[in-house]
């Protein structure tokens, strides 16, 4: 093996040394390319196996009680049955916090929180919640609209759900993510003799 010592004048790198360098460089390049391909294929395989599906939310039932709208201020109780569907076969969901609010004409009128829970894979959970509006201020126009809807026997509300969730697959737990569910134009009848129409919600995750 040719070695360079201080006694020899610095020699031009020989052709075989260059060849050796090129060979080493090629080896390293191939190694890293192979590594990238292996990591990529592994990630893709895991992704294909887990493939998180979109969560599905609907409002299955809703009712209004103790309605009182006086001087643009609203007192009322809203009951909702929120249907949360986890269609994933491998990912269960930890709901760490859940907030539900109800809005009329973009004005929040009532708010409630739900108990944290764990949702298994391929599971449907019905969340029942009662939201109480207490002296909630409405604008003059919102108040007029609400009075008119009241006289027609039903009111159109927006229901928002905001939750902090984590997915769990095997022993791996995802970081905490914010799930936003918007159920708009939920038509709630004042009389329980009228049928409630199930309403689909939009998911933002
Ligand atoms: C919806 O809620 C109302 C009022 O609580 C109740 O009378 C009715 O039976 C419920 N409907 C369904 C389909 O659960
Ligand atoms: C409705 O609310 C007003 C103002 O808070 C109150 O004076 C009135 O007694 C309430 N009406 C009923 C039927 O509860
Ligand atoms: C969903 O999970 C809850 C809590 O583990 C369970 O009580 C319920 O029966 C499950 N529902 C379905 C449809 O699997």
Image: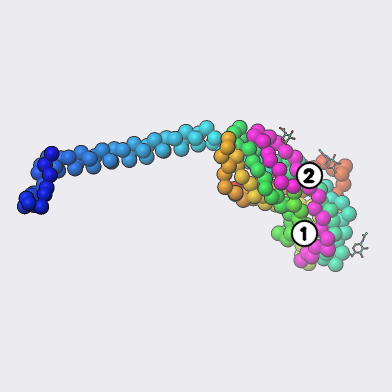
- Quarter occupied by residue 136: bottom right
- C-alpha span from label 2 to label 1: 18 Å
Residue at mark 2: 128
Residue at mark 1: 109
Colour mapping used in the image: rainbow
Label 2 neighbour load within 10 Å: few <14, some 14-19, many 20+: some
Residues in magenta?
Answer: 115-139
- Residue 57 is situated, as x and y percent measured from the top left of the image, at 68, 42
- Answer with mark 2 or mark 1, whichever residue precedes in sequence: 1
Please identify the quadrant where the N terminus is shown: top left
Tell me if label 2 and label 1 are in contact, CB under 8 Å.
no
Q: Is residue 186 above or below residue 146?
A: above
For residue 118, the mark is: none
Q: In what element is the residue under mark 2?
A: strand
- Front: mark 2 or 1: 2
**Residue 122 visible (yes or no):** yes
- Residue 105 is situated, as x and y percent measured from the top left of the image, at 73, 59
Label 1 neighbour load within 10 Å: few <14, some 14-19, many 20+: many
Left or right: residue 23 versus residue 165 is: left
């Amino acid at each position: 093996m040719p070695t360079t010592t201080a006694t020899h004048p610095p020699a031009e790198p020989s052709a075989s040394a260059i060849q050796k360098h090129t060979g080493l460089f090629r080896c390293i390049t191939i190694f890293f390319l192979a590594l990238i391909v292996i990591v990529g294929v592994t990630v893709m395989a895991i992704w294909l196996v887990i493939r998180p599906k979109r969560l599905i939310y609907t409002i299955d039932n809703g009712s209004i009680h103790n309605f009182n709208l006086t001087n643009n201020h609203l007192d009322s109780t809203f009951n909702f049955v929120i249907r949360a569907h986890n269609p994933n076969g491998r990912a269960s969901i930890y709901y760490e916090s859940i907030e539900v609010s109800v809005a009329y004409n973009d004005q929040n009128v009532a708010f409630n929180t739900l108990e944290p829970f764990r949702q298994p894979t391929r599971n449907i959970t019905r969340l029942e919640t009662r939201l109480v509006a207490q002296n909630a201020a409405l604008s003059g126009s919102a108040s007029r609209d609400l009075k008119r809807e009241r006289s027609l026997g039903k009111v159109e509300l927006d229901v928002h759900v905001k939750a902090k969730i984590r997915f769990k697959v095997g022993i791996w737990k995802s970081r905490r993510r914010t799930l936003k569910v918007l159920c708009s134009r939920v038509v709630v009848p004042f009389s329980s003799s009228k049928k409630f129409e199930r309403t689909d919600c939009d998911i933002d995750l």
